[in-house]
Protein backbone atom coordinates (compact mmCIF):
# COMPACT_ATOMS: atom_id res chain seq x y z
CA UNK A 1 0.00 0.00 0.00
CA UNK A 2 1.42 3.25 -1.06
CA UNK A 3 1.67 5.68 1.84
CA UNK A 4 -0.38 8.80 1.46
CA UNK A 5 1.52 12.08 1.96
CA UNK A 6 -0.52 14.67 3.76
CA UNK A 7 0.35 18.37 3.46
CA UNK A 8 1.31 19.72 6.87
CA UNK A 9 -0.42 23.12 7.30
CA UNK A 10 1.77 24.00 10.32
CA UNK A 11 4.43 26.61 9.63
CA UNK A 12 7.87 26.40 11.11
CA UNK A 13 7.48 28.13 14.53
CA UNK A 14 10.79 29.99 14.14
CA UNK A 15 9.75 31.53 10.83
CA UNK A 16 6.32 32.44 12.24
CA UNK A 17 7.87 34.19 15.27
CA UNK A 18 10.24 36.18 13.04
CA UNK A 19 7.33 37.31 10.90
CA UNK A 20 5.32 38.38 13.92
CA UNK A 21 8.31 40.28 15.34
CA UNK A 22 8.84 42.06 12.03
CA UNK A 23 5.18 43.08 11.90
CA UNK A 24 5.38 44.34 15.47
CA UNK A 25 8.48 46.39 14.69
CA UNK A 26 6.83 47.90 11.59
CA UNK A 27 3.74 48.79 13.60
CA UNK A 28 5.81 50.32 16.40
CA UNK A 29 7.82 52.42 13.94
CA UNK A 30 4.63 53.71 12.34
CA UNK A 31 3.30 54.73 15.78
CA UNK A 32 6.59 56.35 16.82
CA UNK A 33 6.97 58.24 13.54
CA UNK A 34 9.21 58.04 10.54
CA UNK A 35 12.86 57.59 11.35
CA UNK A 36 14.15 59.95 8.69
CA UNK A 37 11.92 62.90 9.56
CA UNK A 38 13.89 63.74 12.69
CA UNK A 39 10.81 63.52 14.88
CA UNK A 40 10.24 59.79 15.37
CA UNK A 41 12.20 57.10 17.14
CA UNK A 42 14.13 54.24 15.59
CA UNK A 43 12.71 51.11 17.25
CA UNK A 44 15.96 49.21 16.71
CA UNK A 45 17.88 51.94 18.55
CA UNK A 46 15.38 51.73 21.38
CA UNK A 47 15.67 47.92 21.59
CA UNK A 48 19.46 48.05 21.50
CA UNK A 49 19.85 51.00 23.86
CA UNK A 50 21.81 50.61 27.09
CA UNK A 51 21.31 52.26 30.42
CA UNK A 52 24.02 54.81 29.55
CA UNK A 53 21.93 56.03 26.60
CA UNK A 54 18.90 56.89 28.73
CA UNK A 55 17.68 60.45 28.77
CA UNK A 56 18.45 62.15 32.05
CA UNK A 57 15.62 64.66 31.62
CA UNK A 58 13.41 63.09 34.28
CA UNK A 59 16.09 63.31 36.92
CA UNK A 60 16.50 66.29 39.29
CA UNK A 61 18.50 69.17 37.86
CA UNK A 62 21.11 70.81 40.09
CA UNK A 63 20.23 74.34 41.14
CA UNK A 64 22.65 76.92 39.78
CA UNK A 65 23.21 79.54 42.47
CA UNK A 66 24.95 81.75 39.91
CA UNK A 67 21.67 82.11 38.01
CA UNK A 68 19.01 82.61 40.66
CA UNK A 69 17.07 85.08 38.53
CA UNK A 70 14.88 84.48 35.54
CA UNK A 71 13.34 87.24 33.47
CA UNK A 72 9.72 87.20 32.42
CA UNK A 73 8.38 87.08 28.89
CA UNK A 74 7.33 90.78 28.86
CA UNK A 75 10.87 91.69 30.01
CA UNK A 76 12.34 89.65 27.13
CA UNK A 77 9.99 91.24 24.60
CA UNK A 78 10.86 94.77 25.72
CA UNK A 79 14.59 94.06 25.57
CA UNK A 80 14.11 92.47 22.15
CA UNK A 81 12.26 95.58 20.94
CA UNK A 82 15.17 97.76 22.11
CA UNK A 83 17.70 95.46 20.43
CA UNK A 84 15.84 95.30 17.11
CA UNK A 85 15.45 99.07 17.04
CA UNK A 86 19.19 99.43 17.72
CA UNK A 87 20.02 97.01 14.90
CA UNK A 88 17.72 98.78 12.45
CA UNK A 89 18.98 102.28 13.22
CA UNK A 90 22.59 101.10 13.33
CA UNK A 91 22.29 99.55 9.88
CA UNK A 92 20.91 102.80 8.43
CA UNK A 93 23.38 105.02 10.32
CA UNK A 94 26.61 103.22 9.38
CA UNK A 95 25.53 102.43 5.83
CA UNK A 96 25.11 106.17 5.29
CA UNK A 97 28.20 107.16 7.27
CA UNK A 98 30.59 104.65 5.73
CA UNK A 99 28.98 104.79 2.26
CA UNK A 100 28.99 101.03 2.02
CA UNK A 101 26.60 98.21 2.86
CA UNK A 102 26.51 97.62 6.61
CA UNK A 103 24.22 95.07 8.21
CA UNK A 104 23.55 94.77 11.94
CA UNK A 105 21.39 91.88 13.13
CA UNK A 106 20.11 91.03 16.57
CA UNK A 107 21.03 87.40 17.30
CA UNK A 108 19.52 86.82 20.73
CA UNK A 109 19.50 87.37 24.47
CA UNK A 110 21.69 85.50 26.92
CA UNK A 111 21.87 85.40 30.71
CA UNK A 112 24.96 84.38 32.65
CA UNK A 113 27.33 85.70 35.32
CA UNK A 114 29.70 88.54 34.55
CA UNK A 115 32.66 86.30 35.36
CA UNK A 116 31.59 83.75 32.75
CA UNK A 117 31.29 86.52 30.18
CA UNK A 118 34.75 87.89 30.96
CA UNK A 119 36.35 84.45 30.64
CA UNK A 120 34.93 84.13 27.12
CA UNK A 121 36.26 87.47 25.87
CA UNK A 122 39.46 87.46 23.80
CA UNK A 123 42.42 89.60 24.78
CA UNK A 124 43.08 92.11 23.42
CA UNK A 125 39.62 93.31 22.45
CA UNK A 126 37.55 96.50 22.61
CA UNK A 127 35.39 96.90 25.71
CA UNK A 128 33.92 100.01 27.29
CA UNK A 129 32.06 100.86 30.49
CA UNK A 130 28.95 102.96 29.92
CA UNK A 131 26.60 104.73 32.32
CA UNK A 132 22.95 104.57 31.28
CA UNK A 133 21.11 106.73 33.78
CA UNK A 134 18.56 105.97 35.31
CA UNK A 135 19.83 102.38 35.14
CA UNK A 136 21.71 101.63 38.34
CA UNK A 137 25.44 101.14 37.92
CA UNK A 138 27.52 100.76 34.74
CA UNK A 139 26.91 98.57 31.70
CA UNK A 140 29.47 97.19 29.28
CA UNK A 141 29.63 97.25 25.50
CA UNK A 142 31.97 94.84 23.72
CA UNK A 143 32.93 95.32 20.07
CA UNK A 144 35.05 92.72 18.32
CA UNK A 145 38.58 94.13 17.96
CA UNK A 146 38.92 93.00 14.35
CA UNK A 147 35.63 94.72 13.57
CA UNK A 148 36.92 97.93 15.18
CA UNK A 149 39.98 97.99 12.93
CA UNK A 150 37.80 97.46 9.83
CA UNK A 151 35.56 100.36 10.90
CA UNK A 152 38.56 102.60 11.55
CA UNK A 153 40.19 101.84 8.20
CA UNK A 154 36.98 102.71 6.39
CA UNK A 155 36.49 105.90 8.44
CA UNK A 156 40.04 106.99 7.52
CA UNK A 157 39.36 106.47 3.82
CA UNK A 158 40.99 103.06 3.42
CA UNK A 159 39.67 99.71 2.30
CA UNK A 160 37.64 97.61 4.77
CA UNK A 161 40.33 94.97 5.18
CA UNK A 162 40.85 92.74 8.20
CA UNK A 163 43.86 93.46 10.41
CA UNK A 164 46.66 90.92 10.05
CA UNK A 165 47.54 90.99 13.75
CA UNK A 166 45.21 92.08 16.54
CA UNK A 167 46.91 94.39 19.02
CA UNK A 168 46.24 97.18 21.50
CA UNK A 169 45.16 100.57 20.18
CA UNK A 170 47.67 103.32 19.59
CA UNK A 171 46.80 106.74 21.01
CA UNK A 172 45.36 107.90 17.68
CA UNK A 173 43.44 104.65 17.22
CA UNK A 174 42.09 104.91 20.76
CA UNK A 175 40.62 108.31 19.96
CA UNK A 176 38.95 107.01 16.80
CA UNK A 177 37.69 103.91 18.63
CA UNK A 178 36.26 106.13 21.37
CA UNK A 179 34.27 108.12 18.78
CA UNK A 180 33.06 104.85 17.26
CA UNK A 181 31.93 103.44 20.61
CA UNK A 182 30.23 106.73 21.51
CA UNK A 183 28.27 106.52 18.27
CA UNK A 184 27.06 103.02 19.17
CA UNK A 185 26.22 104.26 22.68
CA UNK A 186 24.14 107.11 21.25
CA UNK A 187 22.25 104.68 19.01
CA UNK A 188 21.54 102.48 22.02
CA UNK A 189 20.34 105.50 24.01
CA UNK A 190 17.85 106.34 21.27
CA UNK A 191 16.67 102.74 21.22
CA UNK A 192 16.14 102.75 24.99
CA UNK A 193 14.19 106.02 24.75
CA UNK A 194 11.28 104.08 23.26
CA UNK A 195 10.67 102.81 26.79
CA UNK A 196 12.54 105.17 29.11
CA UNK A 197 14.58 108.35 28.66
CA UNK A 198 18.24 107.53 29.21
CA UNK A 199 21.32 109.71 29.66
CA UNK A 200 24.39 107.90 28.32
CA UNK A 201 28.03 108.52 29.14
CA UNK A 202 31.16 106.62 28.11
CA UNK A 203 33.14 106.04 31.31
CA UNK A 204 36.19 104.07 30.14
CA UNK A 205 37.54 102.13 27.17
CA UNK A 206 40.13 99.35 27.42
CA UNK A 207 41.70 96.64 25.29
CA UNK A 208 41.82 94.39 28.34
CA UNK A 209 38.28 94.01 29.76
CA UNK A 210 39.70 92.93 33.14
CA UNK A 211 40.94 96.49 33.65
CA UNK A 212 37.34 97.71 33.70
CA UNK A 213 35.65 97.82 37.09
CA UNK A 214 32.13 98.53 38.26
CA UNK A 215 30.37 95.18 37.76
CA UNK A 216 30.75 92.39 40.31
CA UNK A 217 31.98 89.10 38.82
CA UNK A 218 29.15 87.23 40.53
CA UNK A 219 26.46 89.53 39.13
CA UNK A 220 23.82 88.04 36.88
CA UNK A 221 23.97 89.91 33.56
CA UNK A 222 21.78 90.14 30.47
CA UNK A 223 23.65 90.13 27.17
CA UNK A 224 22.11 91.52 23.97
CA UNK A 225 24.04 89.92 21.10
CA UNK A 226 24.44 91.40 17.62
CA UNK A 227 26.28 90.38 14.46
CA UNK A 228 27.72 93.14 12.29
CA UNK A 229 28.59 92.52 8.65
CA UNK A 230 30.77 95.12 6.96
CA UNK A 231 31.51 94.17 3.37
CA UNK A 232 33.01 90.66 3.66
CA UNK A 233 33.94 90.97 7.32
CA UNK A 234 31.71 89.88 10.21
CA UNK A 235 32.07 90.43 13.93
CA UNK A 236 30.02 90.49 17.14
CA UNK A 237 28.82 93.36 19.29
CA UNK A 238 27.48 92.66 22.78
CA UNK A 239 25.65 94.85 25.27
CA UNK A 240 26.06 93.60 28.84
CA UNK A 241 23.71 94.94 31.52
CA UNK A 242 23.52 93.66 35.12
CA UNK A 243 20.06 92.43 35.98
CA UNK A 244 20.17 94.52 39.17
CA UNK A 245 20.69 97.71 37.15
CA UNK A 246 17.06 97.59 35.99
CA UNK A 247 15.83 98.14 39.57
CA UNK A 248 14.80 101.81 39.11
CA UNK A 249 13.01 101.06 35.81
CA UNK A 250 11.93 97.46 36.42
CA UNK A 251 8.21 98.31 36.27
CA UNK A 252 8.73 99.80 32.79
CA UNK A 253 10.65 96.86 31.32
CA UNK A 254 8.84 94.21 33.33
CA UNK A 255 5.32 95.47 34.06
CA UNK A 256 3.64 93.44 36.76
CA UNK A 257 0.36 91.87 35.84
CA UNK A 258 -0.92 90.78 39.24
CA UNK A 259 -4.51 89.62 39.27
CA UNK A 260 -6.55 90.12 42.44
CA UNK A 261 -7.56 86.72 43.77
CA UNK A 262 -10.30 88.13 46.02
CA UNK A 263 -13.78 88.98 44.78
CA UNK A 264 -15.55 92.32 45.21
CA UNK A 265 -17.35 91.33 48.41
CA UNK A 266 -14.10 90.22 50.05
CA UNK A 267 -12.34 93.43 49.04
CA UNK A 268 -15.18 95.58 50.43
CA UNK A 269 -15.16 93.56 53.65
CA UNK A 270 -11.41 94.12 54.04
CA UNK A 271 -11.78 97.86 53.46
CA UNK A 272 -14.55 98.01 56.05
CA UNK A 273 -12.36 96.25 58.60
CA UNK A 274 -9.48 98.63 57.92
CA UNK A 275 -11.78 101.65 58.26
CA UNK A 276 -13.19 100.35 61.57
CA UNK A 277 -9.69 99.74 62.86
CA UNK A 278 -8.59 103.28 61.94
CA UNK A 279 -11.71 104.84 63.41
CA UNK A 280 -11.37 102.96 66.69
CA UNK A 281 -7.66 103.63 67.13
CA UNK A 282 -6.71 106.23 69.73
CA UNK A 283 -4.71 109.38 69.20
CA UNK A 284 -3.76 112.33 71.45
CA UNK A 285 -5.47 115.62 70.57
CA UNK A 286 -4.09 118.69 72.36
CA UNK A 287 -5.35 122.27 72.19
CA UNK A 288 -2.45 124.60 72.87
CA UNK A 289 -3.52 127.81 74.60
CA UNK A 290 -0.03 129.24 74.32
CA UNK A 291 3.61 128.70 75.17
CA UNK A 292 6.55 130.65 76.50
CA UNK A 293 10.11 129.92 77.59
CA UNK A 294 11.35 130.32 81.14
CA UNK A 295 14.02 128.92 83.43
CA UNK A 296 13.76 125.90 85.70
CA UNK A 297 13.84 128.02 88.89
CA UNK A 298 10.65 129.87 87.87
CA UNK A 299 8.91 126.60 87.14
CA UNK A 300 9.88 125.16 90.55
CA UNK A 301 8.51 128.26 92.31
CA UNK A 302 5.08 128.12 90.64
CA UNK A 303 2.09 127.77 92.96
CA UNK A 304 -1.71 127.77 92.80
CA UNK A 305 -3.06 131.21 91.83
CA UNK A 306 0.02 132.37 89.88
CA UNK A 307 -0.72 134.05 86.55
CA UNK A 308 1.29 133.12 83.46
CA UNK A 309 1.76 135.89 80.91
CA UNK A 310 1.38 134.35 77.42
CA UNK A 311 2.88 136.24 74.44
CA UNK A 312 -0.14 135.74 72.12
CA UNK A 313 -3.33 137.77 72.23
CA UNK A 314 -6.72 136.58 73.42
CA UNK A 315 -8.14 136.53 69.88
CA UNK A 316 -5.17 134.64 68.42
CA UNK A 317 -6.25 131.23 66.94
CA UNK A 318 -5.33 128.24 69.07
CA UNK A 319 -3.13 125.50 67.68
CA UNK A 320 -4.64 122.02 67.78
CA UNK A 321 -2.12 119.18 67.71
CA UNK A 322 -2.80 115.56 66.75
CA UNK A 323 -0.14 113.04 67.80
CA UNK A 324 2.23 115.93 68.55
CA UNK A 325 1.88 117.64 65.16
CA UNK A 326 0.05 120.88 64.36
CA UNK A 327 -3.10 119.93 62.44
CA UNK A 328 -5.75 122.67 62.91
CA UNK A 329 -6.30 126.24 64.02
CA UNK A 330 -9.29 126.87 66.29
CA UNK A 331 -11.14 129.44 68.40
CA UNK A 332 -11.94 128.99 72.11
CA UNK A 333 -15.61 128.91 73.13
CA UNK A 334 -18.22 127.16 75.22
CA UNK A 335 -20.92 124.54 74.60
CA UNK A 336 -23.34 124.43 77.51
CA UNK A 337 -21.31 124.17 80.67
CA UNK A 338 -18.29 122.74 78.81
CA UNK A 339 -15.37 124.61 77.30
CA UNK A 340 -14.97 123.95 73.56
CA UNK A 341 -12.81 124.77 70.57
CA UNK A 342 -14.23 125.50 67.14
CA UNK A 343 -12.09 124.35 64.16
CA UNK A 344 -11.28 127.25 61.86
CA UNK A 345 -8.72 126.04 59.30
CA UNK A 346 -6.73 122.88 58.57
CA UNK A 347 -2.94 123.07 58.58
CA UNK A 348 -2.19 119.63 57.17
CA UNK A 349 -4.21 116.96 55.37
CA UNK A 350 -2.22 114.02 56.78
Image (spheres, rainbow, N blue to C red):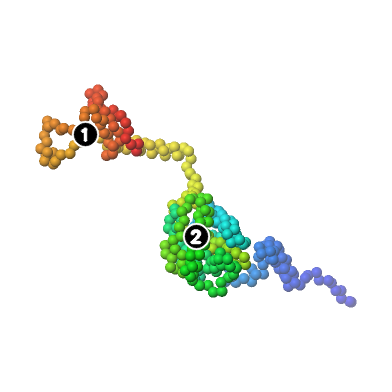
Under circle 2, the secondary element is helix
Residue 95 placement: quadrant? bottom right
In-image side of 76 versus 284 (left or right): right
Residue at 32% of width from left, 33% of height from top?
346
Seen in the picture, residue 332 relative to 280 is either above or below; the reply is: above
Residue 320 at x, y percent in the picture: 27, 34
User: Where, by quadrant of the figure, is residue 283 drawn?
Assistant: top left
242 relative position to 52: left or right: left
Rendered-image quadrant of the C terminus: top left
Q: Is residue 336 above or below residue 267?
A: above
At label 1, counting other C-alpha atoms closer than 10 Å, the crowd grade (few under 14, some 14-19, many 20 or more) is some
User: Could you tell me residue 63's position as x and y percent?
Assistant: 47, 63
Number of numbered discs on residues: 2
Residue 143 sits above or below residue 71 on the image: below
Check residue 17 in the rendering and tell me which mark sits there, or answer none. Answer: none
Q: According to the image, label 1 marks what residue?
A: 290
Query: Residue lying furthest front in this view?
Result: 157
**Depth order, front residue of 60/39:** 39
Whole-number angstrom distance, CA of label 2 to CA of label 1: 65 Å
Image position of 259 with respect to 326: above or below: below
Give the foreground label among 2 and 1.
2
User: Is label 2 in contact with label 1 (beta carbons under 8 Å)?
Assistant: no
**Which of the marked residues, 2 or 1, is nearer the chain's N terminus?**
2
Toward the top, the furthest residue is: 336
Q: Nearer the viewer, residue 198 or 18?
A: 198
Disc marking residue 182: 2
Label 2, residues with CA under 10 Å away: few <14, some 14-19, many ≥20: some
Residue at the (66%, 64%) spot, across then down:
38
Residue in the image at 47% along x and 42% along y = 262
Residue drawn at (29%, 32%) of the image: 329
| Mark 1 element type | loop
Amino acid sequence: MTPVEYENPTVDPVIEQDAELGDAIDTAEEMAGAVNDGLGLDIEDVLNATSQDEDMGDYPVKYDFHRPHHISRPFQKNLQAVAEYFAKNGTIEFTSRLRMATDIKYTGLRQCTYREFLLELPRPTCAAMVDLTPLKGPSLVHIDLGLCFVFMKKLLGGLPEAENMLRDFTEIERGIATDLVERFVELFRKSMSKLVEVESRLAALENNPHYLSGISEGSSVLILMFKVKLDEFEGPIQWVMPLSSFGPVREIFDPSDIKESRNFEELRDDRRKILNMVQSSGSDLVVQLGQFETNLETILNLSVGDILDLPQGVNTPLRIQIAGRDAWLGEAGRVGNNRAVQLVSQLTKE
